[in-house]
Amino acid sequence: MNDNYLKSLNLEDLQIMRNEIFARYNYIFKSGGEMDTYFKKQSWYIRINKNVDQLLTDIEKVNIKSIRKVEQVKKKEK
């Protein structure tokens, strides 16, 4: 994942992008939380799994780390 592209996104978009990786594996987000509310509106999303760590590919794990890194930098800049 391109760091320059990630840096061009705002915090909300980064959060959604990171959590969409989990949502694609039907991760159950905190009930009533931001991501739960957001993904419940997506027609493809189904709440099934409490833990999806074993399902993530190596590339997805790297992408999650990259997104989190940019999120942390942007939070410090606020």
Image: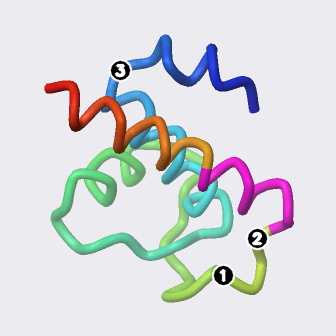
Does residue 66 lie above or below 23 as drawn?
above
Does residue 64 lie above or below 27 as drawn?
above
Q: Quadrant of the N terminus?
A: top right
Q: Please state the extent of the stretch shown in magenta in the rendering.
A: 57-65
Count residues near mark 1 (Cα–Cα under 10 Å), then give few for <14, some for 14-19, many for 20+: few
Pick the residue in front: 43 or 8. Answer: 8
Count residues near mark 2 (Cα–Cα under 10 Å), then give few for <14, some for 14-19, many for 20+: some
Residue at left offset 75%, top offset 86%: 54
Q: Which residue is mark 3?
A: 10
Question: Which secondary structure, mark 2?
Answer: loop
- Report the amino acid beneath label 1: Asp
- Report the amino acid beneath label 2: Leu
Mark 3 or mark 2: whose residue is earlier in sequence: 3
Does residue 4 lie above or below 54 as drawn?
above
Residue at left offset 72%, top offset 62%: 61
Main secondary-structure element of the magenta-colored stretch: helix
Tag 2 and tag 1, C-beta contact below 8 Å: yes
Residue that lies at the very extreme toward the right in this rendered image: 58
Mark 3 or mark 1: whose residue is earlier in sequence: 3
Question: Which secondary structure, mark 3?
Answer: loop
- Residue 68 place in picture, x, y as percent: 48, 49
Q: Which residue is mark 2?
A: 56
Q: Which residue is mark 1?
A: 53
